Image (tube, grey):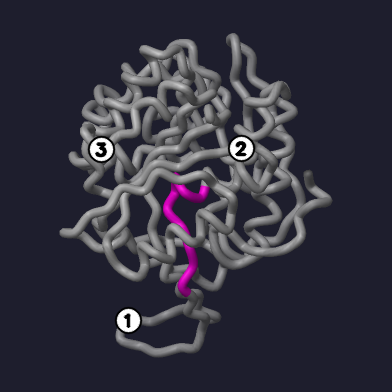
Amino acid sequence: MALPLVVLGDFAWDVLIRTNTRLLPGGDTYGEVQLMPGGSAANVAVWAQRCGLKTGFIGKIGLDRMGELARDDLNAEQVQSWLLHSDAQLTGSVAVFVDETGERSMVSGRGADHFLLPSELPRQVISEAGCLHLTAWSFFTDPPRAAAREAARIARQAGVPISFDPASFQMIHEAGLNAFLKGTADLGISVLLPNYEEGNVLTGETEPEAIAARLAELYPGALIMLKLDANGALVHQAGESTRIPPAPGQLVDATGAGDAFAGAFLSRYLTGSSAVEAASFATRISAWVIQRLGARPRGDFSRLL
């Protein structure tokens, strides 16, 4: 059955470490250590599904216990999955360090999610989707870059719109700006979902309106959905920019807030809401997420729907 949204990319387990005080080099402190499901692409799929949009996920996991748990997690979230298996790599994992202010830093291991191959793609699933979502985590190394680009080619050929999240300002730096733009500007992106730091790195601009306008030049025809964290968001469409005010929420953990925003935004935008309406909804969801630990916190957010 064709799905309104199919997300391709990483499923990884987050080892979340949150300190209550500053961690000094060589020092010790108390905090919280938890194992939580994550991966930017999987997070987007889960949040889109939670927000009411039937969503599928394509990714690669290891033939290990964590891979079994990944399948169980997506099943529990009612996300339809196409999970390829690797007998050479373990299921992906990420160390997530959350400091006493709630800001997060991540170290990503290269698990099975980084080894998806073009030959493994479920082509019919992609060609029949209402939208294909990709994240730049599938573009920083090859594999899985070739598989992600092939998925985009299949989508374009079938007339399926593509949404794209640039994923990491630091990784864009390390990959090289020109190389990153060369590998993504020709994808035929319909919706671009950067945060402020990624937009700044991609354009060299500092003001949100200028960032969005320049991104619209770099990715012609794309709706620019610029995430501004505590300052809300900015929608840039057809040459016009609209500021979206932030939703109230005290930062506890910023992990996955951008993924939650993307999933929530797509859940509304792909079902007929305007970009401004969808962005307003997404800011409320991401504000709910940052007040809790982890990229996919449990709890009753039904009042936000």
Kind of residue sitting beneath label 3: Glu
In whole angstroms, how far apart are the C-alphas of marks 1 and 3?
A: 44 Å
Residue drawn at (27%, 26%) of the image: 150
Q: Does the stretch in magenta take in 123?
A: no
Residue at the spot of label 2: 54
Element carrying mark 1: loop
Q: Residues within 10 Å of mark 1 (few under 14, many from 20)?
A: few
In the rendered view, tell whether residue 131 sits above or below residue 8.
Answer: above
Kind of residue sitting beneath label 2: Lys
In the rendered view, tell whether residue 159 sits above or below residue 12.
Answer: above
Instruction: Give x and y (percent) for residue 261.
Output: 60, 42
Which of disc 3 and disc 1 is earlier in sequence?
Answer: 1
Element carrying mark 2: loop
In front of the other: 120 or 266: 120
Residue 120 disc label: 3
Whether residue 200 is visible: no
In whole angstroms, how far apart are the C-alphas of marks 2 and 1?
A: 46 Å
Kind of residue sitting beneath label 1: Pro
Occupied quadrant, residue 130: top right
In front of the other: 188 or 58: 58
Range drawn in magenta = 35-43
Q: Which residue lies most toward the front here?
A: 1
Instruction: Give x and y (percent) for residue 59.
Output: 36, 46
Q: Residues within 10 Å of mark 2 (few under 14, many from 20)?
A: some
